[in-house]
Amino acid sequence: QVQLVQSGAEVKKPGASVKVSCKASGYTFTSYYMHWVRQAPGQGLEWMGVINPSGGSTNSAQKFQGRVTMTRDTSTTTVYMELSSLRSKDTAVYYCARGPDILTLTTDFDFWGQGTLVTVSS
Amino acid sequence: QAVVTQEPSLTVSPGGTVTLTCGSSTGAVTSGHYPYWFQQKPGQAPMTLIYDTSNKHSWTPARFSGSLLGGKAALTLSGAQPEDEAEYYCLLTYNAARVFGGGTQLTVL
């Protein structure tokens, strides 16, 4: 069965960076994109970006360009999301979610990780 | 960046019918925006209910349906159940970028 297992909660100081991991299993890792979505406490969902695990290409929301880096390790079927220059407004739960099939572009957002709480506080 | 709008809150009676809508600041929502609908309950990750306007996953209860209505995407719940009380989010695609709506808190009362 498809599973996305994320790394544990993090506490960071303003100005630092955080790297969240998402290990995928139960499907062919390089056949599906992977999204990153975040949710601040009591707020709505916010799409951050998407990575193609096959070639490593990425597309991020304009708001995060220059501050977010998405990478992948095909040997461990893990994708990573690194967010730099953290500020208190970045305190949120960060989710990975399986994206569409790379060839057919179907079945987007069908499986989600459990979420990783990142707290930014001095 | 486009802004996606949803009703902040709606209330439906048990067994009743309610329609949630999803609009775009760029104009009418079309099938080319590939509308998605998600349900999220407190403390849980979102769950996809509807994809590409009206398609359902195997886990989507039959009482949920998606459509385009009056230039917006719509999620209709027919025969509301207490367990349907949740936050609902729509998502639209704009040239490969995705934008979520602000969410609708649905109360079943």
Image: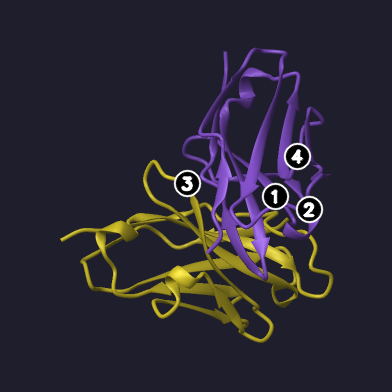
Chain colours: A yellow, B purple
Chain letter of the residue carrying label 1: B
Cα–Cα span, label 3 and label 2: 21 Å
**Same subunit: marks 4 and 3:** no
Please say if the residues under marks 2 and 1 sit with CB atoms less than 8 Å apart: yes
In contact (CB < 8 Å): disc 4 and disc 3: no
Which residue sits at x=45%, y=63%? A7
Residue located 81% across and 43% down the image: B58
| Disc nearest the viewer among 2 and 4 | 4
Residues at circles 2 and 4 in contact by the CB criterion of under 8 Å:
no
In the image, residue B7 sits, relative to residue A113, either above or below, namely above
Helix, strand or loop for disc 1: strand
Observer-nearest of B27 and B59:
B27
Asked whether the beta carbons under mark 1 and mark 3 sit within 8 Å of each other, the answer is no
Tell me the amino acid under the disc marked 3.
Gly
- Determine the secondary structure under disc 4: loop
Say which label, 2 or 4, has the lower sequence index.
2
Disc 2 residue type (three-letter): Asp
**Subunit bearing disc 2:** B
Q: Determine the CA span between mark 1 and mark 3.
A: 15 Å
Q: Which mark is residue B70?
A: 4
Task: Give how far across and how far down residue B3 sits, in percent.
Answer: 54, 54
Residue B57 shown left or right of residue B1 in the figure? right
